[in-house]
Image (cartoon, grey):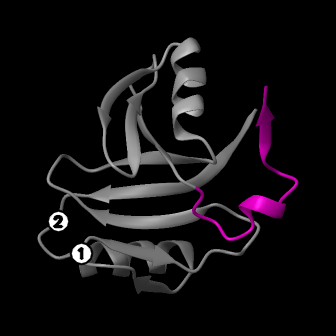
């Protein structure tokens, strides 16, 4: 048994300065943003909603989903059975592609309420 849910929408931004993407999306969505590290900004979303991250990237701009799970390997296997493929396994997450061509990541729990939330899917 393992658990998973949508953790975040990640706005991948191919920009020279991350601040321009942060300023736009904070203004567009009406949430303040704070820098998480050199590549990321995090909008102050309400606690009951997925995180929205701004990520500076080298590839063309797009939006991708992060699915958080307490067992990344089990969640990757479940998603592969649904038709997704693994693009890259990294130390802390796995990049996958849906049969529709959309990229997404499977990550360790990110939101503080993962362990006690009733909106987490339980997979057997």
**Neighbour tally class for label 2: few under 14, some 14-19, many 20 plus, Cα within 10 Å:** some
Query: With respect to residue 39, does 66 lie above or below?
Result: above
x, y (%) of residue 92? 39, 52
The image quarter containing residue 46 is: bottom right
Q: Is 122 covered by the magenta stretch?
A: yes
Quarter of the picture holding the C terminus: top right
Q: Which mark is residue 15?
A: 2
x, y (%) of residue 43? 51, 76
Q: Residue at x 37, y 25 (%)?
A: 86
Q: Which residues are magenta?
A: 109-124
Left or right, residue 8 beside residue 90: right
Q: Is 29 covered by the magenta stretch?
A: no
Left or right, residue 103 beside residue 59: right
**Tally of marks:** 2
Q: Which mark is residue 69?
A: none
Query: With respect to residue 48, does 64 lie above or below?
Result: above
Q: Which residue is mark 1?
A: 18
Quarter of the picture holding the N terminus: top right
- How far apart marks 1 and 2 lie (CA) works out to 6 Å
The image quarter containing residue 77 is: top right
Q: Secondary structure at mark 1?
A: helix
Work out which residue is located at the far right of the displayed protein and give it: 118
x, y (%) of residue 100? 45, 20
Q: Secondary structure at mark 2?
A: loop
Query: With respect to residue 116, does 25 lie above or below?
Result: below
**Neighbour tally class for label 1: few under 14, some 14-19, many 20 plus, Cα within 10 Å:** some
Query: With respect to residue 51, does 35 lie above or below?
Result: below
- Seen from the viewer's position, the closer of residues 42 and 77 is 77
Q: Are marks 1 and 2 in contact (CB under 8 Å)?
A: yes
- Seen from the viewer's position, the closer of residues 51 and 37 is 37
């Amino acid at each position: 048994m393992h658990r998973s849910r949508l953790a975040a929408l990640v706005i991948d931004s191919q920009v020279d300065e991350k601040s321009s993407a942060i300023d736009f999306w904070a203004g567009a969505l009406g949430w303040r943003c704070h820098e998480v590290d050199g590549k990321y900004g995090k909008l102050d979303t309400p606690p009951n909603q997925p995180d929205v991250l701004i990520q500076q990237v080298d590839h063309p701009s797009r939006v991708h989903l992060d699915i958080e799970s307490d067992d990344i390997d089990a969640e990757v296997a479940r998603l592969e059975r649904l038709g997704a493929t693994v693009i890259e396994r990294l130390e802390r997450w796995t990049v996958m592609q849906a049969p529709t061509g959309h990229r997404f990541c499977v990550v360790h729990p990110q939101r503080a309420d993962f362990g006690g939330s009733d909106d987490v899917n339980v997979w057997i």
